[in-house]
Image (cartoon, rainbow, N blue to C red):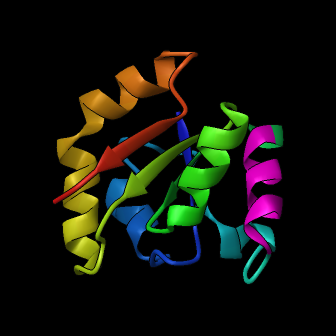
Amino acid sequence: MKLLFDENLSRRLMPLVADLYPDSTHVAMVGLLQSPDREVWEYGRAHGFVIVTADADFYELATTYGPPPKVVWLQGCGYPTRNAAQLIRDQAIRLNEFASDKDRAILILRR
């Protein structure tokens, strides 16, 4: 599974989870910084990413259109990057199960 981190999450998150998700990237790294959510959505779908965001707008896209792409919503993510990374690491099994379930569109994680 490869993750696409939305712009509302720090780029510093990538190296903190790279051992688990080595092909992950950030929207800034693929030229999508300040792009509309729909463009990020389409990029994620076209390139096989799971979008990781702190933005409720992706919840709306996921529930309206369904997967792909899948969306991981770090709900209430007003905490430091290292804590967001730890949450992703702690929930790695859930994330992998979610990615394997073709019917699920959204996974909400809370600290």
- 57 above or below 82? above
Is 71 situated left or right of 44 in this image?
A: left
Please give the range of residues in magenta. 36-45
Magenta stretch: dominant SS? helix
- The image quarter in which residue 33 lies: bottom right
Q: Position of residue 11 (x, y in %)?
A: 50, 76
- 78 above or below 44? below
**Magenta stretch contains residue 39:** yes
Depth order, front residue of 66/19: 66
**Residue at image x 35%, y 54%?**
17
Is 92 situated left or right of 1 in this image?
A: left
Is 64 situated left or right of 59 in this image?
A: right
- The image quarter in which residue 48 lies: top right
- The image quarter in which residue 67 lies: top right
Q: Is residue 4 visible?
A: no
Q: Position of residue 91 (x, y in %)?
A: 23, 40
**Residue at image x 62%, y 43%?**
62
Q: Position of residue 81 (x, y in %)?
A: 29, 76
**In the picture, which quadrant includes the C terminus?**
bottom left
Depth order, front residue of 95/102: 102
